[in-house]
């Protein structure tokens, strides 16, 4: 068997020590984390995700810092508003470490410090606002908190991405008063809308009545115009008839004046007979005058017929005279 000498034992021990030393100088950092390296208790460098090298027995890993975005819950707290109303508020904070060394050595217990800072600023910002502003301007509150807190924590190597107020809970009596106020406001709007509807209806009815009156007046105007035009034409016709009769009288034609008088006589009798209050029609005693009038009308007709026959005879192309009554003469010669 081989003899193990003291030199061999030393060589094996030295080999094991060298391997252990190399392994001690290699550090693995997981994704999403950074590790700080300290030499004799003082910060030296930061190891990023992957394999990192340090000096064995001299350097050591100081802090492992989470570089991912983190969420911190802000617990319920009471805030007194500008108008002395007490509300209960809670929220959440989203932040991310940008500088691992500053986050590890500039502040102790990073999350607790951030939580206290957010809590105090919530009271400051929300305490400077009225209750109505507090309930209706939540986005403005979040923006103001984010601006103030992010500026304060920049020295710690972190970035505050969002601050969200989750719940704002007023006292019970204020909630009931707000409910009554909302109901009164809705009732007021309903009354206003009803009044506006009634007003609009009255306006529309008035406009309709106005349009009806205007159209009726226009109709009466048009009817009066038509009536006047008809009367004017009738007057023109009567004037022309009177002129014709006057010319016939001036020529000594008594048949025309007889026809004119007979026409007026008959129109007067028709008007008397058509009267709605007329119960009894009294004929004139001088019937012979009426018969003479009708005879005058017949004479006018015969005269007109004779003139028509004479006019037809004077036309060129006729071979013989026209007999008025062909049935009694036995025919033309």
Image (cartoon, helix red, strand yellow):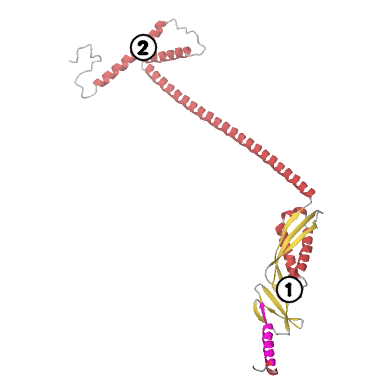
Q: Residues within 10 Å of mark 1 (few under 14, many from 20)?
A: many
Residue visible at 68% across and 85% down in the picture: 20
**In what element is the residue under mark 2?**
helix
Which type of secondary structure does the marked residue at label 1 adopt? Answer: helix
Going from the N terminus, do you reach mark 2 or mark 1 first?
1
- Vertical position of residue 115 compared to residue 44: above or below: above
**Which residue occupies 79% across, 59% down?**
77
Depth check: 17 or 140 in front? 17
Work out whether residue 248 can be spotted. yes
Q: Nearer the viewer, residue 218 or 119?
A: 119
Residue 133 shows in this picture: no
Q: Quadrant of residue 242?
A: top left
- Decide whether residue 14 is among the magenta residues: yes
Q: Which residue is mark 2?
A: 296
Q: Which residues are magenta?
A: 9-28
Q: CA distance from mark 2 to mark 1?
A: 138 Å
Label 2 environment density (alpha carbons within 10 Å; few <14, some 14–19, many ≥20): many
**Magenta span main SS:** helix
Question: Picture quarter containing residue 192?
Answer: top right
Return the residue found at the far right: 84
Farthest residue toward the top? 285
Against 205, is 112 above or below?
below
What quarter of the picture does the C terminus occupy?
top left
Q: Name the residue located 67 percent from the left edge and 86 percent from the top edge.
A: 19
Q: Nearer the viewer, residue 56 or 83?
A: 56
Q: Are marks 2 and 1 in contact (CB under 8 Å)?
A: no
* Residue 229 highlighted magenta (yes or no): no
Rendered image quadrant of residue 7: bottom right
Query: Quick one: 276 or 77, which is closer to the camera?
Result: 77
Q: Which residue is mark 1?
A: 103
Q: Position of residue 299 (x, y in %)?
A: 33, 12
């Amino acid at each position: 068997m081989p003899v193990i000498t003291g030199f061999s034992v030393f060589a094996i021990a030295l080999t094991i020590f060298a391997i252990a030393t190399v392994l001690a100088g290699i550090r693995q950092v997981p994704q999403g984390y950074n590790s700080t390296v300290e030499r004799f208790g003082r910060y030296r460098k930061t190891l990023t995700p992957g394999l990192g090298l340090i000096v064995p027995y001299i350097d050591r890993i100081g802090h492992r810092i989470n570089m991912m975005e983190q969420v911190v819950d802000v617990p319920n707290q009471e805030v007194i508003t500008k108008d002395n109303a007490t509300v209960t508020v809670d929220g959440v904070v989203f932040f991310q470490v940008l500088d691992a060394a500053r986050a590890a050595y500039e502040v102790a217990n990073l999350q607790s410090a951030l939580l206290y800072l957010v809590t105090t600023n919530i009271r400051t910002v929300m305490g400077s606002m009225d209750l109505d502003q507090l309930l209706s301007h939540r986005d403005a509150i979040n923006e103001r908190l984010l601006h103030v807190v992010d500026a304060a924590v920049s020295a710690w190597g972190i970035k505050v991405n969002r601050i969200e107020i989750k719940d704002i809970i007023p006292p019970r009596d204020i909630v009931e008063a707000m409910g009554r106020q909302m109901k009164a406001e809705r009732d007021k709007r309903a009354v206003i809308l009803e009044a506006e509807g009634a007003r609009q209806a009255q306006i529309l009815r008035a406009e309709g009545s106005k349009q009806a009156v205007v159209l009726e007046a226009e109709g009466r105007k048009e009817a009066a115009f038509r009536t006047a035009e008809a009367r004017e034409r009738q007057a023109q016709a009567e004037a022309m008839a009177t002129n014709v009769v006057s010319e016939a009288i001036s020529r000594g034609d008594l048949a025309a004046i007889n026809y004119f008088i007979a026409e007026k006589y008959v129109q007067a009798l028709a008007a008397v007979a058509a009267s709605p209050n007329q119960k009894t029609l009294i004929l004139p005693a001088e019937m012979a005058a009426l018969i003479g009038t009708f005879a005058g009308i017949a004479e006018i007709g015969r005269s007109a017929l004779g003139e028509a026959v004479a006019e037809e005879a004077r036309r060129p192309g006729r071979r013989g005279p026209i007999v008025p009554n062909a049935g009694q003469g036995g025919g033309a010669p």
